[in-house]
Image (spheres, rainbow, N blue to C red):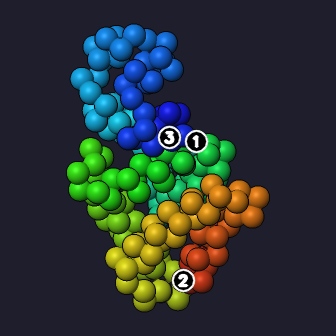
Amino acid sequence: MELFSRSGFHAVSLRDIAAHAGLTHAGLLHHFPGKDELLIQVLTRREDEAAQQALSADSSREPEKVLIRHLDQITRNMHTPGLVGLFVKISGEAADPGHPAHEYFVERYRRLRRRTAWLLAQLFEQADPPVSHDPDAVAQQLLALVDGLQTQWLLDPDQVDMRRAVEVFLTQLGLGVGRD
């Protein structure tokens, strides 16, 4: 994760990764047949770790609690610039259809848009008064906001509070959110 986040996928060799991990090149190849597979495993592990953290705090599926857990994940991300940098850098590189993580990110964003739209639909319906925004459109906007905030935060962390910016966005939509 560290090497990919610092240098990008294409600039790092398997020999670099093996040396950084204290393995031989052959030892690394024993576990991962190539750099493409290693990258997908790194990305998947990071996403799985984030999901476990969100679920371990509270297993409730109540929309308000789910939203708070997502906001908490944004706060945790503000303490892991290397991991945020990894996703920003690799997702940008993966826009190229030939990139090994292209399909991973296509599917990831489809899944995130679907889950986020579902969550927003629940929150819009429960709001008082109910909110009439299109959950699919707002899900795209929210994901774009978070991605853009991550880049801004990486460039100027003292001036960008990602969680606060998302809270303001959601409040402007008519959803009362905030820190527990």
Q: Disc 2, disc 1: CB below 8 Å? A: no
Vertical relation: 116 (above or below) 80: below
Please indicate whether residue 27 sits to the left or right of residue 138 in the image: left
The residue beneath circle 2 is 173
Residue type pointed to by label 3: Ser
The residue sitting at 31% across, 31% down in the picture is 35
The residue sitting at 43% across, 33% down in the picture is 12
The residue beneath circle 1 is 82
The residue beneath circle 3 is 7
Q: Earlier in the sequence, mark 2 or mark 1?
A: 1
**Residue 10 on image: x %, y %:** 38, 41
Would residue 69 be seen by someone viewing this image from the given angle? yes
The residue sitting at 29% across, 62% down in the picture is 110
Please indicate whether residue 90 sits to the left or right of residue 152 in the image: left
**Residue 16 on image: x %, y %:** 45, 24
**Residue 179 on image: x %, y %:** 69, 61
